């Protein structure tokens, strides 16, 4: 076999038999290069372990007889000889890998991306080259600052990382739910993260920025202002992963088949509509259900209501990189939709939960460097650093260079290269000539290019110096200097209620500060965005606001920013609590009727009563307003509310009223049926917008108006734009 191979190579080199020489004929080279690659790899199913039958074995297959360790006599010490014991405990001791340095807390799911058409007029990327073409995806959502066990509803930027398993390799968009970032140069990332993470002395506070060091950094590094405003508004506390958008953040590049390229920004627009929690609710949730977002995603997919996002791009010619009054290489800026419309490319739907959290969600190793043919980078200095950082971090997490071989990381197409060995090598390479160029393996793996193998290429016209003079420098371009105009644009584009919530959030965070210098610096920065904001925060801090600093003040507004200004396109999967009483027979029967009717709209309905009687799903001992997007009191339950309510030993005093009142205070639609109207008065809930009272028994009529309330989502806030809560 070896001799024959040698013969082929030599005859090829000496030109004796050109027909036998793969280098000579591109068609032959192509045929051989692609010959054994037919069909795609199925890494996940190939790796599945089915324990539904079989005997317990050790890691090397020997059957295990029982679960006791081997001892020197029935009461004697455990023997070193017990390799079964040692293997089991040792494996357990090594069960964890280092958690992600940032974005440690997250949840993910599988799905499919379907292209709307052939976009070869924009990019050579193969997953976008045909209408209806389907590409498997895995998406991982996350918070940034918290550790792996932290609560889902911490106020934070949220990760939105998507892997496309394309037929030309893996492509990752490692994005966030906010279209801009805190800093402009990757070298500052460790500083940002150190400032945000808990105090090194006592590791307090977990997963929170309401502390001196975070705001010290924010106010000393004003490039953070714009992203900070997004994080302090609704995007920092989304209702669920399903109700948030995703963004690539940096400007990337689409490269066409002819090598020409254009600049792009990636957008994932949620098909569920955007929705957010309110802060107090998020805080309560952190204690009541730390897995709130994880659970929501899992349940939606299990119930067949997997979420969808439309993937779009904004496309801009390279010579317009500075045309909008900011630099497209500056990741603290977004392009308002009015300046570059969103061009939809396809739809992504998540439809399968991971089988094993660790194997899939924990081990997936996203990298901005995972790009495919047709997509390229820009000189955004944040992106440039990320291309290094993610590979480096995966090496640390997985203890070696073979993590791309893990089932969740393997591309669906075969891999051929000269990378060899390393910890946990899973592949058995047959080629003994692991170098290029070679003759001894017939020149394989062959080098791809435009004609054969559809080789990866960098946009040919790309310049490396961003139009500068190419001299070495450690400066940032002065086109990156304006940190305040877009923060103001963002603020202007919110509804007054959301503006108030943003200010409340800054008040909450800065009220935790102890350093007078930091507080003063925060006011200085806020004042560059708006004197009104600075004043409203200053009053809470008991300080004087600085005089107006109007250089960057503007009245510009842009679409697509407000969360409260939208009606949800679907109310399916939202959760309704029906508060009923076992003490009144018609209460439970009406609760059942409400449940039946609301379930028809795809709502998830929970009937709550004093004890788990027939038709009761949850008790007042365990239920609370965080569990519901809307709350209805069924008739006959009114006796459980208010000061006059008969105390029950079954739950803490006042629980039913607390649920109703919390729901109302947190902007959820609340409603009553018939006599239950009394519950409103008893708990001090006024009949204002957001409160739906049906006089009679007509559950259909109730469901209709209540459904509209759910679609408005934070209904009482959305409607009470001019309430006395706003503008203070
Ligand atoms: Fe990340 N980031 N990041 N980041 N990032 C990581 O990589 C880093 C940045 C983002 O679900 C780490 O695998 C640097 C911007 C997401 O697995 C790490 C810089 C954006 C995820 C890392 C940034 C992100 C990460 C930690 C500044 C939005 C989670 C573990 C140059 C566009 C991915 C890991 C997942 C994770 C470094 C800035 C998004 C340490 C150095 C900007 C969604 O490598």
Image (cartoon, rainbow, N blue to C red):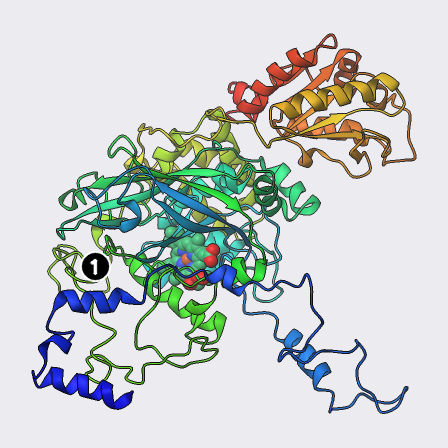
Residue at 23% of width from left, 43% of height from top?
Answer: 326
Tell me if mark 1 has few (under 14), some (14-19) or many (20+) residues whose alpha carbon lies within 10 angstroms of its own: few
Q: Nearer the viewer, residue 445 or 463?
A: 445
Name the spot of residue 278 as percent of width and height, x first: 58, 35
The vertical placement of 137 against 48, above or below, is above
Q: Nearer the viewer, residue 533 or 674?
A: 674
The vertical placement of 448 against 376, above or below, is below
Residue at 67% of width from left, 20% of height from top?
Answer: 597
Q: Nearer the viewer, residue 509 or 525?
A: 509
Q: Is residue 535 toward the left or the right of residue 691 in the image? A: left
- Quarter of the picture containing the N terminus is bottom left
Name the spot of residue 269 as percent of width and height, x first: 40, 36
What residue does disc 1 label? Answer: 454
Name the spot of residue 146 as percent of width and height, x first: 56, 56
- Residue at the limit of the structure toward the top, as seen here: 696
The answer to whether residue 191 is visible is no
The answer to whether residue 317 is visible is yes
The vertical placement of 663 against 437, above or below, is above
Q: Nearer the viewer, residue 50 or 675?
A: 50
Q: Is residue 147 toward the left or the right of residue 337 in the image? A: right
- Residue at the limit of the structure toward the left, as seen here: 15
Name the spot of residue 441 as percent of width and height, x first: 24, 81
């Amino acid at each position: 076999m070896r001799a024959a191979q040698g013969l082929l190579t030599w005859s090829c080199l000496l030109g004796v038999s050109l027909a036998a020489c793969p280098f000579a004929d591109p068609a032959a080279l192509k045929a051989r290069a692609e010959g054994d690659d037919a069909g795609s790899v199925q890494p996940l199913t190939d790796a599945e372990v089915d324990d539904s039958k079989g005997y317990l074995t050790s890691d090397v297959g020997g059957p295990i007889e029982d679960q006791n360790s081997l001892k020197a006599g029935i009461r004697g010490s455990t023997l070193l000889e017990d390799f079964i014991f040692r293997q089991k405990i040792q494996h357990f001791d090594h069960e964890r890998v280092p958690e992600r340095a940032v974005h440690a807390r997250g949840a993910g799911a599988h799905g499919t991306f379907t292209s709307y058409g052939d976009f070869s007029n924009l990019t050579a990327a193969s997953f976008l080259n045909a209408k209806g073409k389907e590409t498997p995806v895995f998406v991982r959502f996350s918070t940034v600052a918290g550790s792996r066990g932290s609560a889902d509803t911490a106020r934070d930027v949220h990760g939105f990382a998507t892997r496309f398993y394309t037929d030309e390799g893996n492509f990752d968009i490692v994005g966030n739910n906010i279209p801009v970032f805190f800093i402009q140069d990757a070298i500052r990332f460790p500083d940002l993260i150190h400032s945000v993470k808990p105090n090194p002395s006592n590791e307090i506070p977990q997963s929170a920025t309401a502390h001196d060091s975070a705001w010290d950094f924010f106010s000393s590094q004003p490039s953070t202002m714009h992203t900070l405003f997004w994080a302090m508004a609704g995007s920092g506390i989304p209702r669920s992963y399903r109700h948030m958008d995703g963004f690539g953040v940096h400007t990337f590049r689409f490269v066409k088949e002819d090598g020409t390229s254009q600049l792009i920004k990636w957008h994932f627009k949620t098909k569920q509509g955007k929705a957010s929690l309110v802060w107090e609710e998020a805080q309560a949730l952190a204690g009541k259900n730390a897995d709130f977002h994880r659970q929501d995603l899992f349940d939606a997919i299990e119930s067949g209501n997997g979420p969808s996002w439309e993937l779009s791009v904004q496309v801009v010619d390279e010579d317009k990189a500075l045309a909008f009054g900011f630099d497209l290489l500056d990741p603290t800026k977004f392009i308002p939709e009015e300046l570059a419309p969103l061009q939809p490319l396809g739809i992504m739907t998540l439809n399968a939960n991971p089988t094993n959290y660790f194997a899939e969600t924990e081990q997936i190793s996203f990298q901005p460097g995972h790009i495919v043919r047709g997509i390229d980078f820009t000189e955004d200095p944040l992106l440039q650093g990320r291309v290094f950082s993610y590979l480096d971090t995966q090496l640390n997490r997985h203890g070696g260079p073979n993590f791309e071989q893990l089932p969740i990381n393997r591309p669906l197409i075969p891999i051929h290269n000269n990378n060899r060995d390393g910890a946990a090598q899973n592949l058995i390479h047959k080629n003994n000539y692991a170098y290029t160029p070679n003759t001894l393996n017939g020149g394989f793996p062959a080098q791809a290019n435009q004609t054969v193998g559809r080789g990866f290429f960098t946009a040919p016209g790309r310049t490396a110096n961003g139009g500068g003079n190419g001299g070495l420098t450690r400066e940032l371009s002065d086109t990156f200097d304006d940190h305040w105009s877009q923060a103001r644009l963002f603020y202007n584009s919110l509804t007054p209620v959301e503006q108030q919530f943003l200010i409340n959030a800054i008040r909450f965070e800065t009220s935790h500060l102890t350093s007078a210098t930091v507080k003063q610096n925060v006011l200085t920065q806020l004042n560059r965005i708006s004197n009104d904001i600075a004043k409203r925060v200053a009053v809470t801090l008991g300080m004087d606001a600085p005089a107006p600093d109007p250089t960057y003040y503007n009245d510009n507004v842009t679409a697509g920013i407000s969360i409260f200004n939208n009606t949800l396109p679907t109310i399916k999967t939202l959760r309704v609590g029906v508060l009923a009483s076992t003490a009144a027979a018609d209460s439970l029967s009406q609760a059942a009727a409400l449940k039946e009717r609301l379930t028809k709209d795809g709502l998830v309905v929970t009937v709550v009563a004093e004890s788990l009687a027939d038709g009761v799903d949850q008790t007042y001992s365990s239920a609370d307003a965080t569990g519901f997007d809307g709350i209805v009191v069924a008739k006959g339950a009114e006796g459980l509310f208010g000061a006059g309510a008969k105390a029950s030993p079954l739950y803490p005093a006042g629980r039913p009223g607390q649920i109703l009142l919390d729901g109302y205070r947190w902007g959820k639609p609340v409603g009553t049926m018939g006599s239950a109207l009394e519950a409103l008065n008893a708990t001090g809930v006024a009949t204002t917008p957001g409160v739906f009272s049906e006089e009679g028994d007509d559950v259909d009529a109730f469901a209709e108006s209540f459904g509209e309330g759910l679609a408005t989502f934070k209904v009482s806030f959305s409607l009470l734009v001019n309430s006395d809560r706003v503008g203070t």
